[in-house]
Image (spheres, helix red, strand yellow):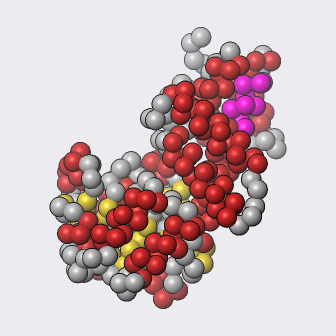
């Protein structure tokens, strides 16, 4: 039964649906979150609640983390490693290369295995169990964690060393943000010129400008006026910032990424801390004095 018991820390918009998928896969999930509301939702889904991170680490051998920042991950690890039973940590968070290497040092000092597995696919993918997991870990533990990952989505291995999966994730998230910012700019220009936004998207998606923003985010969330991709703008800003900082530590300038980060900062300043990443398009609409609306919607 021990192999079927998993701890889970961080029951937010991504963590809770991932924990639910582990429950569906037959795992006994022991959960903790600082939020009382999040704990209640996990309990309603069938998880067994723990009173603290330390209590969780005293109870189960494998613990998953889904947390928003490197600082929070490190704080949790410092408490978690005091546990009597924990032997393995699977970090599903996006924390950056150097933070991942520091995290591995923190847990390995107590003989705890570090498995790095940042995810891509958003809230929709987390709920559907179709996330992409970018994994780096020792070869010897891959077969042990594979069943856990299969309950969450598709696994792609980046290598053994700590930080490799984080490097791949930051590159992906920077490109994803860049696609949305640039596509919002392009659609604003075309719309201002008089092209129907839906027609412009149809042309782009049949041509070389096609990307995830033009095929999914803008048609589904901007044209419909829902603006609910499900990924917080402030988290995208955090990821792009991490990408720039990691590149700077290696002596690599990233001028385009800096411009993307600035646009995300403007979006937060305009629409607040709860802004969705798709609200970037609303900033462009304000600047251009247009609305990127589907032609089937009322004017």
Q: Is residue 132 above or below residue 229?
A: below
Q: Principal SS element in the magenta part?
A: helix
- Residue in the image at 23% along x and 81% along y: 84
Percent position (x, y) of residue 174?
A: 65, 51
Count of marks, rendered view: 0
Residue at the extreme top of the image, as rendered: 299
Left/right placement of residue 83 relative to residue 221 reads: left
In the rendered image, which quarter contains the C terminus? top right
Measuring from the top left, give residue 239's x and y in whole percent: 57, 52
Location of residue 82 by image quarter: bottom left
Residues in magenta, as a range:
182-190
Report if residue 111 lies within the magenta region: no
Q: Is residue 189 magenta?
A: yes
Q: Is residue 126 visible?
A: no
Q: Which of 291 and 289 is in front in this view?
A: 289
Taking depth in this image into account, of 25 and 39 the one nearest to the observer is: 39
Viewer can see residue 216: yes
Residue most extreme to the bottom: 140
**Image-based side of 4 in relation to 70, left or right:** left
Q: Which residue is drawn at 68% across and 51% down?
A: 175
> Is 29 left or right of 234, judged from the image as shown?
left
Seen at 64% across and 62% down, the residue is: 246
Q: Report x, y in % for residue 157.
A: 58, 74
Q: Quadrant of the N terminus?
A: bottom left
Q: Residue at x 56, y 68 (%)?
A: 98
């Amino acid at each position: 039964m021990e192999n079927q018991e998993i701890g889970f820390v961080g029951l937010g918009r991504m963590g809770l649906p991932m924990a639910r998928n582990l429950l569906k896969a037959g795992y006994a999930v022991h959960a903790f979150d600082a939020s009382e509301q999040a704990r209640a939702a996990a309990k309603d889904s069938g998880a067994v609640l723990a009173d603290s991170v330390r209590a969780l680490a005293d109870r189960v051998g494998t613990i998953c983390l889904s947390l928003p920042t490197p600082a929070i991950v490190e704080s949790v690890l410092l408490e978690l490693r005091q546990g009597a039973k924990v032997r393995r940590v699977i970090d599903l968070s996006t924390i950056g290369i150097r933070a991942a290497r520091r995290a591995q040092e923190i847990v390995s000092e107590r003989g705890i295995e570090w498995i790095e597995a940042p995810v891509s696919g958003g809230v929709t993918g987390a709920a559907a169990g179709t996330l992409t997991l970018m994994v780096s870990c020792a070869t010897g533990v891959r077969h042990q964690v594979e069943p856990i990952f299969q309950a969450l989505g598709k696994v792609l291995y980046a290598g053994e060393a700590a930080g490799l999966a984080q490097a791949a994730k930051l590159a992906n998230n920077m490109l994803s943000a860049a696609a949305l910012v640039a596509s919002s700019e392009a659609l604003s220009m075309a719309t201002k010129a008089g092209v129907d936004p839906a027609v412009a998207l149809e042309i782009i998606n049949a041509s070389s400008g096609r990307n995830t923003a033009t095929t999914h985010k803008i048609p589904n969330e901007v044209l419909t006026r829902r603006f609910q991709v499900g990924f917080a703008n402030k988290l995208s800003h955090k990821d792009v910032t991490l990408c720039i900082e990691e590149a700077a530590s290696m002596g690599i300038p990233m001028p385009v990424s800096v411009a993307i980060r600035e646009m995300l900062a403007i979006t937060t300043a305009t629409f607040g801390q709860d802004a969705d990443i798709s609200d970037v398009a609303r900033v462009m609409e304000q600047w251009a004095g247009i609305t990127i609306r589907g032609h089937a919607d009322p004017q």
